[in-house]
Structure formats: structure tokens, C-alpha cells
Image (cartoon, helix red, strand yellow):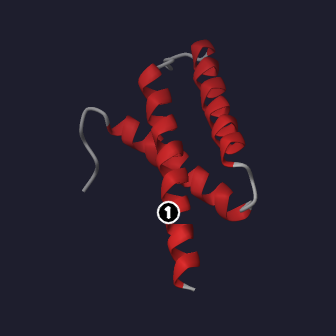
């Protein structure tokens, strides 16, 4: 069953940046969370800027919002799960 609704691309942005955040936090557990947020958001912003120079691509603030939401919620979720695992040990 394919995903077929108006804003599916925003969901995909949210999931992609959420996954990138979780994987980075797992690979580098001591990485400062604020630096990670800044790094991933800057990366997403630069990719959106690059789309201004590509045919059939658009710069969209909604994409940036979906990216940032995925990053922030993943940082919060990762911190919550990590704290719960440490408490239960």
C-alpha cells in the first residue's frame, strides 16, 4: 500500500532527518546535542539552497520545518529512552 497523500514528502523529510539524528547519536553518544542539531539543520538548509539551482526542484520552508521537527523530536526521544534505560539498569 503506497503512501499517497498531499504532504507525504514532509513525512519523508521528518523520518529521514529523525533517522539521521538517531543514528548519529548512537554512533557518537558523547556528541553535544546542540552541535548535532545545528549541524543537521545547517546541512538541510544548504540542501534546500542547492535546490534553487536545480531544475524541477524547489526551496520550501515546510521542508526545513519537517527536517527540524524530525531532528528535535529524535533528540528528545533518544534522551528519554537513554535515561529510562540507565534508570532500569
As drawn, the residue found furthest toward the front would be 87
Image height check: is 76 above or below 86? Answer: above
- Report helix, strand or loop for mark 1: helix
Image height check: is 47 above or below 68? Answer: above
**Would you identify the image quadrant in which residue 25 lies?**
bottom right
Q: For the image shown, how many numbered marks are present on the structure?
A: 1
**Residue 60: image location, x then y, percent:** 46, 20
**Would you identify the image quadrant in which residue 48 lies?**
top right
**Residue 34: image location, x then y, percent:** 67, 41
Picture residue at 63% right of the left edge, 59% below the top: 23
Asked whether 51 or 56 is in front, the reply is 51
Image height check: is 55 above or below 41? Answer: above
Q: Is residue 11 left or right of residue 1?
A: right
Find disc 1 in the rendering and name its residue: 80
Q: Is residue 2 left or right of residue 63?
A: left
User: The C terminus lies in which quarter of the figure?
Assistant: bottom right
Badge 1 crowding class, 10 Å Cα cut-off, few under 14, some 14 to 19, many 20 or more, is few
**Residue 77: image location, x then y, percent:** 48, 58
Picture residue at 61% right of the left edge, 33% below the top: 41
Q: Is residue 1 left or right of residue 58?
A: left
User: The N terminus lies in which quarter of the figure?
Assistant: bottom left
Image height check: is 48 above or below 20? Answer: above
Picture residue at 61% right of the left edge, 25% below the top: 45
Asked whether 16 or 68 is in front, the reply is 68
**Residue 51: image location, x then y, percent:** 58, 20
Q: Is residue 74 left or right of residue 41?
A: left
Amino acid at each position: 500500500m503506497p503512501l499517497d497523500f498531499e504532504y507525504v514528502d514532509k513525512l519523508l523529510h521528518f523520518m529521514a532527518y529523525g533517522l539521521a539524528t538517531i543514528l548519529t547519536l548512537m554512533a557518537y553518544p558523547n556528541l553535544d546535542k546542540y552541535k548535532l542539531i545545528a549541524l543537521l539543520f545547517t546541512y538541510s538548509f544548504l540542501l534546500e539552497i542547492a535546490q534553487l539551482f536545480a531544475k524541477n526542484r524547489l526551496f520550501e520552508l515546510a521542508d526545513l520545518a519537517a527536517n527540524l521537527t524530525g531532528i528535535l523530536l529524535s533528540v528528545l526521544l533518544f534522551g528519554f529512552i537513554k535515561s529510562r534505560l540507565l534508570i532500569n539498569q
